[in-house]
Amino acid sequence: MKKLFLIGKSLKHSISPFVHNKILSELGIDAVYSNVELSDFVKLKEFVEMVRKDKDVIGFNITIPYKEDILEFCDEVSEDVRIIKAANTVKKEEGKLLAYNTDWIGFKKSLEDIGVDVKDKKILVLGSGGAAKACIYGLYRMGAKEVFVANRTYEKAERLREVFQDILKILPVEWLRRYEFKYDIIINTTSVGMYPNIESSPFDFENYVAGIPVFVYDMIYNPPKTTFLEKAEKKGSKTENGLKMLVYQAVEAEKIWFDIVNLSPSFLLEILKECE
Ligand code: ATR
């Protein structure tokens, strides 16, 4: 039986094994997807050594905090990974480890599904970590020319200016000044509001008077409705959580590992329902 893994530091609440094993069984692929918690960089190195030796390993996914660290062990990276320097998918091919990023594709597809157009919109991204980079790259691929970025640590938002300098304009916003401007779209890529800290929110819509955003997105899917989305909805914004992004990035990873993956829209809907 072939093997696939998700690696990360804390994976107790991850629904990725459920999603991937469901896809594998739907496709009739004899493989199993399981979680491997790695406590530190040394363990990450050992995991990669194991992957290189074990002929049954097809590839693996990477989550917090190893999306950038993993690149040190990869032999080749895709064009998007070269820009954003973060990978969530690795495929083993002829002994080589190839790094990909399917997060941004999952994000882009989840927006396209609900007909959100980002062109010429004033967009605010909250956060500046790996999730923010995937989000911004996805926005670029959807036609955005500039993105405002607010981050608690301002320097990290500023650094994104260099990361994206060849493809789109980053406008860093100081965290305390994020309420001063009016935005059409606000996207949360921080972990603020994630289970179990469900009361917290990275943006206080109740005290935001600059305007009502048309669309508000939260990459968090647990809980399905964060305080951030709940308050945005109360103001009248259309909202979306990170569940579709999670399922779509998983499908894209399967496409990379197994070349052709055709899944019906009804099957995807079924997965989404079961994840809710
Ligand atoms: P990921 O890969 O998921 O993006 P990350 O690289 O650890 O994870 O980034 C987490 C993001 O959430 C960062 O933008 C972080 O802000 P800092 O750069 O200032 O650390 C943001 N974040 C985490 N906790 C936060 C909090 N309590 N308030 C505001 N931002 C927070």
Image (tube, rainbow, N blue to C red):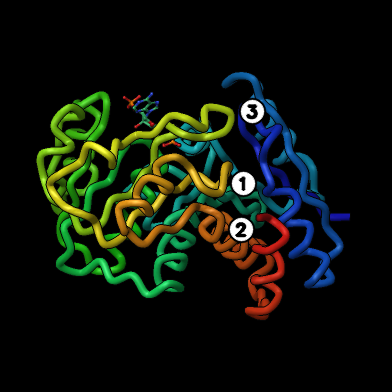
Q: Which residue is mark 3?
A: 10
Q: CA distance from mark 2 to mark 1?
A: 9 Å
> Does the closest atom of ligand 1 sit within 8 Å of the Cβ of label 1?
no
Specify the amino acid type for callout 1.
Asn
Could you tell me which residue is drawn at 36 percent across and 62 percent down? 238
Q: In the rendering, at what x and y percent does residue 254 appear?
A: 65, 63
Q: Is residue 265 visible?
A: yes
Name the quadrant where ligand 1 sits. top left
Left or right of residue 181: residue 129 = right
Q: Is residue 88 visible?
A: no
| Nearer-N-terminus badge (2/1) | 1
Quadrant of residue 157 in the image? top left
Of labels 3 and 1, the one closer to you: 3
Where does the C terminus fall, quadrant-wise? bottom right
Q: Are marks 2 and 1 in contact (CB under 8 Å)?
A: yes
Of labels 2 and 1, the one closer to you: 2
Could you tell me which residue is drawn at 62 percent across and 67 percent down? 255
Q: In the rendering, at what x and y percent does residue 244 appear?
A: 54, 61
User: Residue 61 bears which disc, if any?
Assistant: 1
Q: How crowded is the residue under tag 1: few (<14 C-alpha within 10 Å), some, or many (20+)?
A: many
Q: Which residue is mark 2?
A: 250
Q: Is residue 263 above or below residue 25?
A: below
Q: In the rendering, at what x and y percent does residue 141 appear?
A: 30, 65
Callout 1: helix, strand or loop? strand
Specify the amino acid type for callout 2.
Ala
Callout 2: helix, strand or loop? helix
Residue nearest the viewer, comparing 219 with 171: 219
Specify the amino acid type for callout 3.
Ser
Q: Is residue 168 above or below residue 170?
A: below
Callout 3: helix, strand or loop? loop
